[in-house]
């Protein structure tokens, strides 16, 4: 069981780091990895680690609080069908938006520069997609879990 959790952690870390590297190569002037103190690879590894650790802590908090199940019930009582998997996706997207925004505010230290809020949203969407793929690939997907 511990090896599976480690594999999931590493998969999320790699997915986050690679997503940042690819984004920095595609939109060079809007997503920048590195500065005079930190190299591109170091920034990708550090930022990926921060995203993975904080995202994992938030995931556990949300699971224990029962927030997703509460939202499903709320949507159902309002006559709207919303799957728990969709709500998890929204939770991860919001968490990624906040994390990218916070990390970019410390660009001089961490080395991740994002030009504006639009690219912060784009980075968060790409990260959420990469994390979703890592979750499916490692069996960490939230669908069907309680």
Image (tube, rainbow, N blue to C red):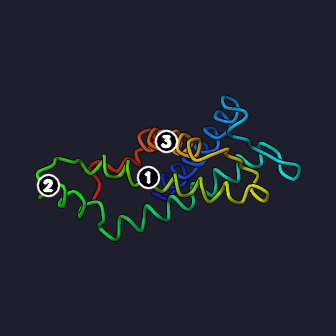
- Sequence-earlier tag: 2 or 1: 2
Farthest top residue in view: 26
User: In the image, is 80 to the left or to the right of 18?
Assistant: left
Q: Quadrant of residue 106?
A: bottom right
Give the residue number, with chain letter if any, for mark 2: 76
Lateral position of residue 54 relative to residue 32, left or right:
left
The residues tagged by marks 3 and 1 sit, at their Cα atoms, a distance apart of 9 Å
In this rendering, position of residue 43 left or right of residue 71: right
Left or right side of 85 for 61? right
Residue drawn at point x = 55 percent, y = 62 percent? 54
Residue 63 locus on image (x, y percent): 35, 64
Q: CA distance from mark 2 to mark 3?
A: 26 Å
Q: State the image coordinates of residue 117 (x, y, percent, origin top left).
A: 57, 47
Q: Which residue is mark 3?
A: 125
Residue 19 point in image, percent of width and height: 60, 38
Q: Nearer the viewer, residue 116 or 132?
A: 116
Q: Which residue is under mark 1?
A: 92
- In the rendered image, the residue lying farthest to the bottom is 65
Mark 2 vs mark 3: which is more N-terminal?
2
Query: Which residue occupies 53% across, 57% down?
Result: 98
Q: Residues under labels 2 and 1: Cα distance?
A: 21 Å
Instruction: Kindly state the secondary structure of the residue where label 3 is placed.
Output: helix
Q: Are marks 2 and 1 in contact (CB under 8 Å)?
A: no
> In percent of the image, x 21 and y 48: which residue is there?
82
Tag 1 or tag 3, which sits nearer the N-term?
1
């Amino acid at each position: 069981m511990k090896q599976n959790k480690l594999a999931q952690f590493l998969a999320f870390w790699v997915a986050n780091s690679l997503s940042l590297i690819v984004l920095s190569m595609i939109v060079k002037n809007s997503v920048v990895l590195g500065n005079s103190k930190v190299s591109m690879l170091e920034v990708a590894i550090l930022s990926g680690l921060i995203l993975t650790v904080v995202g994992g802590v938030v995931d556990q908090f949300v699971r224990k609080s029962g927030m997703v199940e509460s939202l499903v019930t709320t949507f159902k009582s309002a006559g709207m069908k919303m799957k728990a998997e969709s709500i998890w996706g929204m939770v991860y997207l919001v968490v990624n938006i906040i994390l990218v925004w916070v990390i970019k505010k410390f660009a001089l230290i961490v080395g991740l520069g994002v030009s504006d809020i639009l690219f912060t949203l784009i980075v968060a969407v790409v990260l959420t997609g990469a994390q979703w793929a890592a979750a499916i690939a490692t069996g960490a997907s939230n669908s069907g879990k309680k």
